[in-house]
Image (cartoon, rainbow, N blue to C red):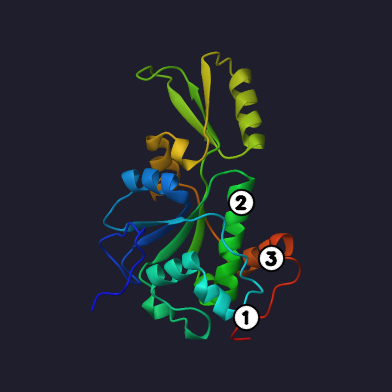
Amino acid sequence: MFPRLPIKLDDCTHHGLGSGAEFYVVEGDSAAGAVSRMRNADYQAVLPMQGKPLNTVRATAQKVVANPWFAALTQALGTGLGDRFDLQALRYDRVILLMDPDPDGIHCGALVSMFFYRWMRPLLDAGRVGIAQAPLATLVVGSVGHPRYVEHHVRSEQELRAVAEQLKAQGDTEVVMRRYRGLAGTDLHVLAATCLDPATRTLRRIGAADAEAAITVFGGGRPARHPRD
């Protein structure tokens, strides 16, 4: 019998530990549509969030299980949660959080990492969760086809200012800035290069210490005890 899977999961062909399969969590249907267009359907799956996730650090098991989006996330991963979590049942090699590079995106990513810390801690301990850093903007020098044409993808306001100053110091005058309004508004080739292509994307692994830091900032104090502690 095939496992029950969420309706909004855009699944991949290959599954299981060692398969190379990647599971992307993104903000909303528009972002999921953009990522699905550029992903490799053989080994990259996509699941959109539906609004801002529940803060599950101090939530009861009953409340977590009853939450539609976390139920969908658990179904997609195939592992169960809490005391019933089984890492060997994980349907993907890696879980990747891909959020908009803005305060809401940071908050959503923190809430999902807090869920993993509280209810799927072995995922973090096994190093199977990462964050793909989406670009805030692209600075384009020259025009397509010109020998000096180049795109600089930046991921923060600080990096944007630094690159702009560097280009100005180099005497580059034909510089155009494309600032993105979330993943859905990102140029598709840029989205693929910076977030999806393993050879060129920026991916940072997150662990329990990162989740604990998120709990301190967003979770209302000290981390709650893990169900297995």
Q: Is residue 51 left or right of residue 92?
A: right
Q: Is residue 85 above or below residue 15?
A: below
- What's the amino acid at mark 3? Ile
Image quadrant where one finds the C terminus = bottom right
Q: Residues within 10 Å of mark 1 (few under 14, many from 20)?
A: some
Instruction: Read off the residue under disc 3.
Output: 215
- What's the amino acid at mark 1? His
Distance between the alpha carbons at the discs numbered 3 and 2? 13 Å
Q: Is residue 141 visible?
A: yes
Distance between the alpha carbons at the discs numbered 3 and 1? 13 Å
Q: Residues within 10 Å of mark 2 (few under 14, many from 20)?
A: some
Asked whether 224 or 50 is in front, the reply is 50
**Residue 32: horizontal and vertical position, in percent?**
40, 49
Q: Which mark is residue 106?
A: 2
Q: Earlier in the sequence, mark 3 or mark 2?
A: 2
Q: Residue at x 42, y 40 (%)?
A: 191
Q: For the residue labelled by badge 2, is the local secondary structure a helix, a strand or a loop?
A: helix
Asked whether 18 or 215 is in front, the reply is 215
- What's the amino acid at mark 2? Ile
